[in-house]
Image (cartoon, rainbow, N blue to C red):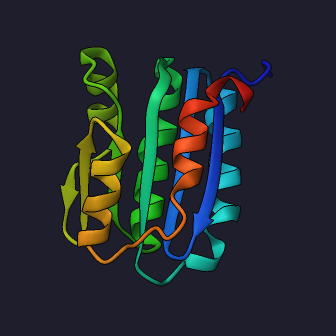
Amino acid sequence: MLPIHGRWKIKVEDKVVMQFFADSWNEEAVIAYIKEFKVAVTPLINDDWAIISVFEQWELGIPEIEHHVIEHCQWFKQHGCIKDCHVYSRNRLKSMQLEKMVPTTDFGYERCVFDNVNAAIEWLDSQGFTISQPQFLYDIASNASEI
């Protein structure tokens, strides 16, 4: 087993999972992240909830992560995630890999992509998912090297 390459941070507030991703990812990172994610969202299961993911510092992943991410997306959709938003500046390679792995819209599930955190927060709020303390999202984006 190789060392984990890739960083993330997860915080659950009310019915919103806020998360941040950085660096390039290997298979070991995605496996560890998914385990941590499932523990973090346990209180939300069987209710409606949302995800906001900041990918600004994410640098893609090796092909071996893709099947894990696809299964992970199926899992969170089956366990109550109905709204999902990604935040990152437009990047063709990043967009191609994310679009390949993560569904955009499905019955009972909708995902949108934004180029800034404020727009994503406003969209989630309009969908009934208010983030009362969004500072986490701003802090992780500005202090990415400390995660």
Q: Residue at x 54, y 76 (%)?
A: 14
Residue 34: x %, y % from top left: 62, 48
Q: Residue at x 49, y 75 (%)?
A: 15
**Which of the 4 image quadrants contains residue 3?**
top right
Closest to the observer, 113 or 42: 113
The N terminus is located in which quarter? top right
Closest to the observer, 39 or 147: 147
Residue 62: x %, y % from top left: 51, 17
Residue 67: x %, y % from top left: 46, 36
Q: How many marks?
A: 0
Tell me: 12 left or right of 85.
Answer: right
Closest to the observer, 137 or 88: 137
Residue 130: x %, y % from top left: 40, 72
Tell me: 90 left or right of 72.
Answer: left
Closest to the observer, 138 or 52: 138
**Which of the 4 image quadrants contains residue 139?**
top right
Please say if 64 is above or below 37.
above
Q: Residue at x 25, y 43 (%)?
A: 113
Please say if 126 is above or below 102.
below
The C terminus is located in which quarter? top right
